[in-house]
Amino acid sequence: MFPNSGRKAARKRSLSRPSLSRASLPAQQRGSALIIGVFVITVMFLLASALINIVQDSDTALTQEVWGTRAFAAANSGADAALAQLFPLNTAANATATCASVSSSWVPPDVVGFHACSVSLRCTSYSVGAVIQYRINSTAVCESGDTRVSRQIEVEARE
């Protein structure tokens, strides 16, 4: 045989077969799917944690709003109670009102809306000409766990 004939045949075979790069082999592509999978899982984790934070902030805001409404109602009821003490319905027509008749606190009734609320009252009187005016400050504090909300109502009345 001829010594160069084997080389030419090998050269022809290598030219007829398409050359494969290392990136196109299936064994080499398995790692890229793993990297894409880890990336997708990481992005989904970040989205889930952001959503959890949004829901938690929404819950906190709703809790603050509910307790704020309760505190407002308690402060308003405390101001009404102070006015009832200042101007009682069953007194004589010539009785004069004094801030001494108003207590410094009001205990809300034991109902769901006033649960865990306390109300403090303050009454001050002053004269405007011949008219005596009264200013009642009612401050309610409602608290539960980490939530503490305070609302204040100010009412003015005169004889």
Image (spheres, rainbow, N blue to C red):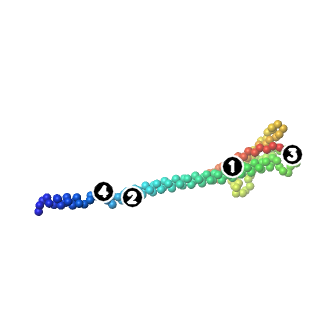
Q: Quadrant of residue 159?
A: top right
The residue mark sitting in front, 4 or 3, is: 4
Q: Quadrant of residue 39?
A: bottom left
To which residue does mark 1 refer?
141
Under tag 3, what secondary structure? loop
Residue 8 visible in image: yes
Of pointers 2 and 1, the one earlier in the residue sequence? 2
Residue 143 visible in image: no
Within 10 Å of the Cα at label 1, are there few (<14), some (14-19), or many (20+) other Cα atoms? many
Where does residue 74 sit, x and y in percent of width and height? 72, 51
Nearer to us in this view, 98 or 36: 36
Of pointers 1 and 4, the one earlier in the residue sequence? 4
- Which residue lies at the image location 67% right of the left edge and 50% below the top edge? 68
Which amino acid type is shown beneath numbered disc 1? Val
Instruction: Identify the residue at the far left of this view.
Output: 1
To which residue does mark 4 refer?
22
To which residue does mark 2 refer?
33
- Which residue lies at the image location 44% right of the left edge and 56% below the top edge? 40
To which residue does mark 3 refer?
95
Say how many tags the image has: 4
Within 10 Å of the Cα at label 4, are there few (<14), some (14-19), or many (20+) other Cα atoms? few
